[in-house]
Structures are given as structure tokens and as C-alpha cells.
Image (cartoon, rainbow, N blue to C red):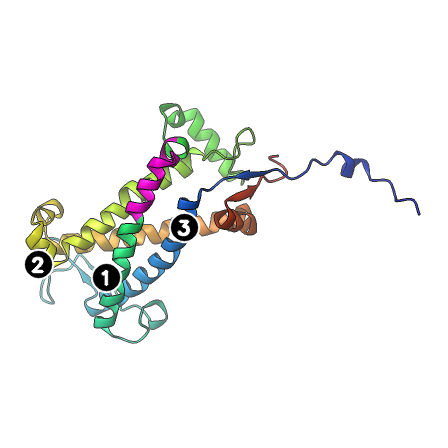
Amino acid sequence: MDEAPLSPEAEAAPPARVIYRHKLATRLWHWVNAVTIFILLGSGLMIFNAHPHLYWGLYGANYDHAWLTLPQWPGWLTIPASYNLAIARRWHLLFALVFGFGLLFFMAASLINRHFQRDLRVRLADLKPQNLRHDLLEHIALRFHDPKDPRAFNIFQKLSYVLVIFGLIPLMILTGLTMSPAMNAAWPWLLDLFGGRQSARSIHFIVAAALTGFIIVHLALVIIAGAWNEVRSMITGRWTVPEDEA
């Protein structure tokens, strides 16, 4: 039997374009961080439940003035689910090491494979008002990639990743170290840098909230952009350019 002729639309449809988007080091760091941050946030909330008050300065106790007091977090958000400060600290300190050395590995690998220079370097032209306005309108229209260069990151991706990689995560690590009495003895300048252990604890909490907000927005954009395509690219490195951009 003769095959039915293809419709003009089918004949004109170009094949899907697949590009290599994420290098192995980026993918490894992404998935290690996905587990690490989940455990750090859960165990951190359990530690916070032991004293749900935040202070500025060197000291903080029940009778001191707290700038923020929150109710205790429910068990379904904490690690472990039932109150156990000792176990929460063990989980937190273990994965804090994974968090810190993971960042060190990723930075070294990204310098070697030129990921920072190629994908995350922010140029002055990127910050021009007309370019920022254009990218903002593209985001509002749910178009997140440049059809001419779909592999490239847009300016909002660059700024957010640079802020997280070079700002929030190092700040989280340094404020965590500042809360350690052993690190206070070894590196007393940390206390001067952050204005005391309680100030470091407050900053640590604020940065954790900012990272949580980043993750929520990141997941929402992944879903909007096409969850399967985005997740697969972070597993295999290969990303299918959406049809309207190909």
C-alpha cells in the first residue's frame, strides 16, 4: 500500500535541535547541592527550634531583646522530625562540609572548563537599560532563551547565579563558621567581620531564607520552561531547543 503523503506542515517541520548545555561538573554540583541544601535546611530549622529568636551583636539569650522571634517549625519541615538537637547538629555539620567542599570543587572545575568566563560573565552591555528591559519583557512573555544563541544565559540568569555562587553561598559558609567556638579561636577576625556570633546567626538565617526563595523561583521557572527538558539536560547535559526558538 502506498503511504499517505505528509501534510505540508509535517514536511516543513524542522527536526528538533539538541545542544550540549551543561558540563559534567555543573551537573554533579547541581544534584549534590539538591540533596545537601535539603538536609541543611531541614536540620537548620530543627536547630533553630531550640531557640527561635534572632539577635544582633555578641550575645543572645532568653532575656535579651530579639529582633525576630518565630514560632517553632513543624516536624514535617525539620530533620529529624521529632525534637533532637544533637542529631540535627550532626546532620548539619556533616552536610555543611559537603556544601563547602562542593563549592570549592565547582569553582575550580568552572575555572578550568571556562564555565564562568563563557556563561556567567556579566558584561557592561548586558546591564544597559534597554537590554534589561528587553529581557524582562521576554521573561514576562515566558521566553527565557535567545533564539539566536539558545545556549547562552540571559542577564537575569547570570545575575542570579553570580549572586548565589559568589555571594549567598560563601556568606552562608562564613557565617556558619563564625558560629563555631573552635573557629572563633582559630579565626577571631570572623567575629569582627560579622559583628559577633549572634549577628552571624541572624545573617545565616537571612541568607538561608534568600536561598530558599531562589530555589522556589528556580523550580517554578523550570516547570514553566518545560520540566522534563530542563531536568533531562541537568542529567545528560543535552537540551532540546523549544520549537518556537529553533
- Circle number at residue 64: none
Which range of residues does the magenta coloring cover?
103-117
Residue 109 magenta: yes
Amino acid type, residue under disc 1 in the picture: Leu
Residue under pointer 2? 59
Q: On the rendered image, what quadrant is the C terminus found in?
A: top right
Looking at the image, which residue is at 7% across and 49% down?
188
Real-space Cα distance between discs 3 and 1?
21 Å
Real-space Cα distance between discs 1 and 2?
22 Å
Q: Main secondary structure of the magenta part?
A: helix
Looking at the image, residue 115 sits to the left or right of residue 175; the answer is right
Real-space Cα distance between discs 2 and 3?
39 Å
Residue at the front extreme of this rendering? 112
Give the answer, above or below, for where 140 lies relative to 227.
above
Looking at the image, which residue is at 31% across and 50% down?
102
Residue under pointer 3? 28
Question: Regarding mark 2 in the picture, which secondary structure is present there?
Answer: loop
Decide which of tag 3 and tag 1 comes sooner along the chain.
Answer: 3
Decide which of tag 2 and tag 3 comes sooner along the chain.
Answer: 3
Looking at the image, residue 104 sits to the left or right of residue 236; the answer is left
**Residue 211 position in % (x across, y down):** 33, 51
Question: Regarding mark 1 in the picture, which secondary structure is present there?
Answer: helix
